[in-house]
Image: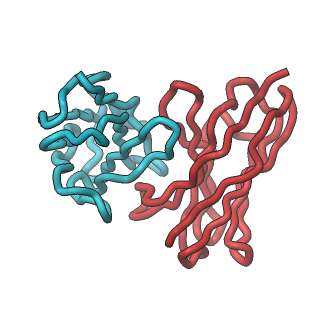
Amino acid sequence: EIVLTQSPATLSLSPGERATLSCRASQSASSSLAWYQQKPGQAPRLLIYGASNRATGIPARFSGSGSGTDFTLTISSLEPEDFAVYYCQQRSNWPGTFGQGTKVEIK
Amino acid sequence: EVQLVESGGGLVQPGGSLRLSCAASGFTFSPYTMFWVRQAPGRGLEFVSGISSNGRATYYADSVKGRFTISRDDSRNTFYLQMGSLRVEDMAVYYCARERGGYYFDFWGQGTLVTVSA
């Protein structure tokens, strides 16, 4: 089973700053990696699939990159509504695994 | 508009049973693989169980094998999670989700809370 390790656990930033979130896989996950955003009391929302494809309705400030074992979610300029927890998820064998999450909090 | 609506959560004693339902609308249900994902209080996301479009393939997390059963009724656009021998560690918000591309989840329900307590 592929283990996904997200870093940092918490990212403290101000609105307008750039956020860079990392997701590292213990073995190659090819490009089958997704990112989700979750706000308190809400269900997760799909942001990125296929490592770099934005889901429907996701603003362009969200971008994903990487392949193999190292993946990155970048938020180019944080909006107030972007402060949340972000999870990566991969498919190695069905259904895959989730990372433990990165919390993006207001500094 | 795609909607997934869970129901059936609640308070149950250890060893008890519950059946969760997820009603789908706004899309053709039968071709999709569907999943249950749970989140314990203050914790991350965990796959619980999934069922393929034809119902022939199912997935269960090791922690629930032999205790939970997933099923679907395409005529009702609904799938289910029958949970038995519930444990305190099963306490969580249970989300249903639609799988796409063989691995990612593009729509999620709002979640239903399962509380296991004496």
Q: Position of residue A16 (x, y in %)?
A: 13, 37
- The colour with which the image depicts chain B is red
Name the one closer to the observer, A84 or B30: A84
Q: Residue at x 20, y 38 (%)?
A: A70
- Residue B26's spot in the image, x, y percent? 55, 75
Give residue A86's quadrant in the image: top left
Q: Is residue A83 left or right of residue B65?
A: left
Q: Nearer the viewer, residue B30 or B39?
A: B39
- Front residue (pair B66, B99): B99
Q: Chain letter for cyan?
A: A
Quick one: quadrant of the C terminus of chain B? top right
Does residue B112 appear left or right of residue A96 in this picture? Answer: right
Position of residue B39 relative to residue A30, above or below, is above
Residue visible at 42% across and 39% down in the picture: A39
Residue B27 x/y as whole percent: 54, 76
- Residue A97 sits above or below residue A6 on the image: below
In the rendered image of this protein, does residue A97 appear above or below residue A51?
Answer: above
Q: Residue at x 34, y 41 (%)?
A: A88
Q: Position of residue A63 (x, y in %)?
A: 18, 50
